[in-house]
């Protein structure tokens, strides 16, 4: 077992002053590459911005924000620099919310990304020699190849298992002695059901010791549920295609926020309405700038993800700041009966109830001209046995707890395990079928 404390000690423990100097140097280089792209050259020339506009990290505020629509408008390659010809791979976002966006990478970009993912895995406790099973879609989605090359760079045996086919996943876990799994959280809960159905104890019947979960919003309660079900720790992994994919921010063994790798990404948290920086520690929209990417520099990119920078230093000794768990995307929020609701608020209530099973779906509908919020929730199988008396109690308790949390009164539909449709990729939590 590799004994060193950090994967890239030099970078991970850089003092803040030196880290900032490195950021300025890299930001200047990034602006230089951006001026090579048709998109930024036009934008920056209009505003009189050049490399010398950047003398400090704060000078980033002179530069305009970018949004997903800019990437779409520049499709397929309007945001690539003159290094586009060196590109050896491209990825697209999964298109959860609309048209996909494309990111090109050259050898430098891919090596830098793989190193960040290796660093992230190491930070969560994976080590060379681990058997790493990557249970997520390969192809254009970044979670597949991103973790594959990251785990290989780490020196783990990386199994490109792909998504779905749970019985086969369990066979791979058993046959190859898998120790670490990366998967989306909603899938791990499903995998546990299959373990049970197969009569295998995931803790005693396998070598599993660590999970990496991410790619979709989830609550602390859902993480706890996974950890309790399997008896294995699960670490949060955050990334997005526009910023390479996985390896942007990752939990360390303290499990107290996600270190965002500030030698590769410049972090801002802004008020999504005013676009002004929020006060330290306040929740806002995460805005990221690539600092180590050549083909597609992306500057002040509005991720739409809501989070905050956690105050204080981490006990692990890494100096890179920590982001709080993402509470949702700014465009995830829906308004029902005049109340602003994030799906994660509802998940957090559901996952605290021991009777609740693994899957839920929020449906917004119009009934007799009135908007209603249905929360369809699967319960544990034992709640449907003949001797069970408490269904009505659960129903009432969910109505009042959800109303207390989001202020709007829901209608609750209690379902048996497996009644809701299973999704292969990221879980869909809300279906909005209202009239307008
Ligand atoms: P798409 O935007 O089409 O879903 P991506 O695969 O690039 O494509 O998804 C990135 C998004 O996934 C992030 O912007 C964020 O909203 C979500 N996400 C990724 N990791 C996490 C995480 N650990 N917690 C919450 N949300 C996450
Ligand atoms: Zn830490």
Image (cartoon, rainbow, N blue to C red):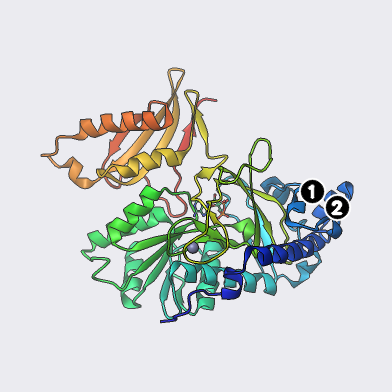
Q: Are marks 1 and 2 in contact (CB under 8 Å)?
A: yes
Residue 162 falls left or right of residue 13: left
Up/down of 245 relative to 65, above or below: below
Q: Is residue 117 left or right of residue 2?
A: right
Q: Residue at x 86, y 52 (%)?
A: 49
Which residue, given by chain and number where applicable, does mark 1 sit on? 62
Within 10 Å of the Cα at label 2, are there few (<14), some (14-19), or many (20+) other Cα atoms? some
Query: Camera-side residue: 2 or 147?
Result: 2
Point out the tag, 1 or 2, that comes first from the N-terminus: 2
Quarter of the picture containing the N terminus is: bottom left
Q: Is residue 13 above or below residue 57?
A: below
Give the farthest residue toward the top: 368
Which residue is depicted at the point 41% across and 55% down? 185
In this rendering, does residue 236 appear at all? Answer: yes
Q: Quadrant of residue 106?
A: bottom right
Q: Residue at x 50, y 55 (%)?
A: 215
Q: Which mark is residue 49?
A: 2
Asked whether mark 2 and ligand 1 are closer than 8 Å, the reply comes as no
């Amino acid at each position: 077992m590799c004994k060193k404390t950090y994967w890239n000690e030099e970078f991970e423990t850089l003092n803040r002053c030196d880290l900032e100097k490195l950021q300025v140097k890299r930001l200047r280089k990034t602006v230089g590459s951006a001026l090579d792209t048709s998109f930024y050259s036009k934008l920056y020339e209009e505003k009189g911005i050049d490399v010398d506009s950047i003398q400090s990290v704060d000078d980033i505020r002179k530069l305009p924000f970018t949004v997903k629509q800019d990437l779409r408008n520049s499709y397929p390659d309007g945001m690539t620099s003159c290094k586009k010809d060196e590109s050896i791979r491209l990825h697209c976002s999964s298109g959860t919310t609309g048209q996909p966006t494309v990111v090109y990478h050259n050898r430098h970009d891919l090596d830098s990304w793989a190193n960040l993912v290796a660093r992230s895995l190491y930070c969560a406790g994976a080590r060379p020699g681990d058997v790493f099973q990557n249970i997520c879609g390969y192809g254009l989605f970044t979670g597949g190849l991103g973790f594959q090359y990251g785990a290989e760079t780490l020196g783990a045996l990386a199994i490109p298992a792909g998504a779905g086919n749970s019985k086969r996943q369990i066979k791979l876990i058993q046959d190859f002695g898998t120790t670490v799994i990366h998967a989306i959280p909603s899938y791990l809960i499903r995998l546990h059901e299959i373990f049970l159905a197969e009569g295998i104890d995931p803790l005693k019947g396998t070598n599993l010791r660590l999970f990496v979960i991410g790619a979709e919003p989830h609550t602390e309660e859902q993480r706890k549920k996974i950890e309790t079900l399997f008896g294995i720790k699960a670490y949060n992994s955050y990334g997005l295609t526009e910023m390479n994919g996985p390896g942007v921010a990752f939990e360390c063994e303290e499990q107290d926020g996600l270190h965002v790798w500030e030698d590769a990404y410049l972090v801002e948290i802004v008020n999504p309405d005013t676009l002004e920086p929020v006060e330290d520690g306040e929740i806002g929209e995460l805005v990221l700038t690539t600092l180590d990417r050549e083909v597609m520099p992306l500057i002040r990119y509005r991720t739409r993800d809501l989070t905050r920078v956690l105050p204080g230093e981490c006990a692990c000794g890494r100096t890179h700041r920590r982001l709080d768990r993402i509470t949702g995307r700014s465009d995830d929020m829906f308004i029902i009966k005049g109340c602003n609701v994030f799906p994660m608020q509802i998940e957090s209530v559901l996952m605290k109830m021991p009777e609740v099973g693994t899957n839920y779906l929020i449906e917004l509908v119009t009934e007799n001209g009135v908007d209603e919020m249905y929360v369809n929730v699967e319960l544990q199988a034992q709640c449907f046995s003949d001797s069970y008396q408490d269904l009505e109690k659960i129903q009432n308790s969910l109505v009042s707890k959800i109303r207390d949390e989001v202020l709007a009164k829901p209608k609750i539909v209690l379902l048996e395990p497996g009644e809701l449709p299973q999704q292969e990729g990221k879980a869909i939590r809300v279906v909005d079928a209202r009239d307008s």
